[in-house]
Image: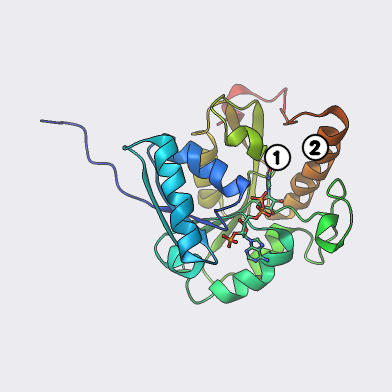
Amino acid sequence: MNSEPARPIRPIAIIGGTGPAGMGLALRWARAGETIIIGSRDEQRAQLAASALQRKVGKQANVSGLENGAASSAADILILTVPFEGQATLLKQLKSSITPGSVLIDATVPLASAVGGRASRPLGVWQGSAAQQAAELVPKGVSVVAAFHNLSADLLNGDDPLDCDVIVCSDDGDAGQLACELAAKIPGVRALDGGRLENARIVESVTALLIGMNIRHKGHAGIRITGLPPASYR
Ligand SMILES: NC(=O)c1ccc[n+]([C@@H]2O[C@H](COP(=O)([O-])OP(=O)(O)OC[C@H]3O[C@@H](n4cnc5c(N)ncnc54)[C@H](OP(=O)(O)O)[C@@H]3O)[C@@H](O)[C@H]2O)c1
């Protein structure tokens, strides 16, 4: 008989999860034993993505695919991985599907490419950052965290450990802690508390810098924060 206590099932819904960023996070968390729901505007696309992930991870993977609204209702942990140009409209559509008490972890990077500019330039957002825009649009009682902006989707979708820190910003300490815990499940990743949600603008804009470096140097740049006490790295 297995004497280990049963793990509570806490599905993680990845909204806009059919793209490289969502699929990469889903892959790493499915491998770590998490229950994943891939969300899409199209249920069939979500199911195809979930099947592809299931094949990649193997029989032990617990992955399903749902339309974004159904995915949002089915989980209390939501990861938002859509292009900035779709973020506000989508969050307005999902308002009635997101349960109060949920945590929404936003990985959206506002890039100038959303308005015909370069992906290596950050786009100014009235609220300060994509994450702060998300915080304005989610239902009352939903905590927003900014995280995972600086991880390369190409590397996430591979098999090797990453060489990158994840800076987590939130005004809700418990929600930030949850994001740190999820980040630490990705091999090679360390999570760091980046302070309040208003700091998300800095972390989001670092991604534009990394994209420019990737173009110039033909690589997959990440970041490491050094010099903090060991206990700061989760
Ligand atoms: N790629 C990276 O390396 C990386 C790294 C860190 C952060 N990010 C950020 O994470 C987000 C997703 O990145 P990605 O490269 O995965 O993007 P993506 O492939 O362009 O989009 C992800 C998914 O979002 C959905 N989507 C596209 N346009 C939409 C719209 N107008 N409204 C609602 N949903 C829409 C699509 O899914 P359906 O068609 O199935 O609905 C798509 O598969 C972006 O904000 C990006 O800046 C990316």
| Amino acid type at mark 2 | Leu
x and y percentages locating residue 72 in the rendered image: 47, 65
Seen from this angle, which residue lies furthest left? 1
Name the quadrant of the N terminus. Answer: top left
Q: Are marks 2 and 1 in contact (CB under 8 Å)?
A: yes
x and y percentages locating residue 129 in the rendered image: 76, 58
Q: Give the answer, above or below, for where 110 lies relative to 94.
A: above
Q: Secondary structure at mark 2?
A: helix
Horizontally, residue 105 falls left or right of residue 150, namely left
Q: Is mark 1 within 8 Å of ligand 1?
A: yes
x and y percentages locating residue 77 in the rendered image: 47, 55
Name which residue lies at 66% across and 70% down.
136
Q: Is mark 2 within 8 Å of ligand 1?
A: no
Q: Quadrant of ligand 1?
A: bottom right
Q: Which residue is mark 1?
A: 150
| Amino acid type at mark 1 | Asn
Q: Which mark is residue 234?
A: none
Q: Which mark is residue 210?
A: 2
